[in-house]
Amino acid sequence: AQSVAQPEDQVNVAEGNPLTVKCTYSVSGNPYLFWYVQYPNRGLQFLLKYITGDNLVKGSYGFEAEFNKSQTSFHLKKPSALVSDSALYFCAVRDSARNQGGKLIFGQGTELSVKP
Amino acid sequence: DAGVIQSPRHEVTEMGQEVTLRCKPISGHDYLFWYRQTMMRGLELLIYFNNNVPIDDSGMPEDRFSAKMPNASFSTLKIQPSEPRDSAVYFCASSSSLTGGLETQYFGPGTRLLVL
């Protein structure tokens, strides 16, 4: 079965410090991995995705994520956090081995709070 | 493009009433998704369509929920009769299998539903 886990409900970071939001996954085939962000009272916005190729993926707003196959992880990172990065972050996965169209499995979300 | 459009943005109704949520996907997108978001259950996929055809409705909670997509530019999610436990934010999202990848979903602003 496919699944994705975000082990932290909340991450607190001081502005200017690096941030990491964790995600681990489980699929039977090769994973397609995604990060989405949700600002208050808004829909989710696509940040970045990993399909194949370089394990380090760069996305919007200075975010990047590193695919680690041995650890089945896809952690989201940013070298220097901004207060405006405060939001809810979702990791999502799709199993490339299964024909499920565009269906994604989303994690429960991690609330990122960046304090000045 | 105006993005995914949802209406109404807010809906307050009484238990037992019929509720209809509406969605206009991004023009040219061939996939449409309906999600429900609550604090307790997180983000749940209810149903998705490809080229106006329902592909997977396994997430529809019960027979009180129904969704239609009569054409490429319009979809509805109907709850009849509504119950207080249906209170949630309902999101519509669309994606294109031709541009950006069908897993890159564009979300609407959501409809916040409160059933009293």
Image: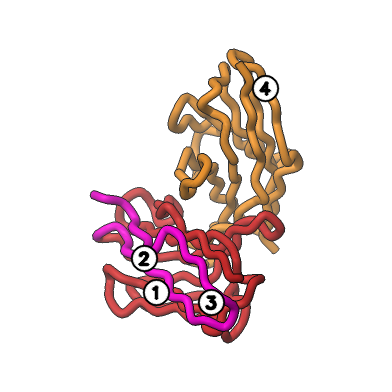
Q: Which quarter of the rendered picture does the C terminus of chain A lie within? A: top right
Q: Quadrant of residue A7?
A: top right
In the image, are marks 4 and 1 on the same chain? no
**Badge number at residue B23:** 2
**Badge number at residue B57:** 3
| Chain letter, colour red in render | B
Which SS class for mark 1? Answer: strand
x 26%, y 50%: residue: B2
Instruction: Give me the chain letter of mark 1.
Output: B
Whether residue A84 can be seen here: yes
Which residues make up the magenta segment? B1-27
Q: Which quarter of the rendered picture does the N terminus of chain A lie within? A: bottom right
x 39%, y 74%: residue: B76
Residue bearing mark 1: B76
Q: Check if mark 2's residue and mark 1's residue have beta carbons within 8 Å.
A: yes
A86 lies above or below B41: above
Whole-number angstrom distance, CA of label 4 to CA of label 1: 40 Å
Whichever of labels 1 and 3 marks the residue nearer the N terminus, that label is 3
Q: Check if mark 3's residue and mark 4's residue have beta carbons within 8 Å.
A: no
From the image, state whether disc 2 or disc 3 is nearer to you: 2
Whichever of labels 2 and 1 marks the residue nearer the N terminus, that label is 2
Which SS class for mark 2? Answer: strand
Instruction: Give me the chain letter of mark 4.
Output: A
Residue A86 x %, y %: 57, 30
Colour for chain A in the figure: orange
In the image, are marks 2 and 3 on the same chain? yes
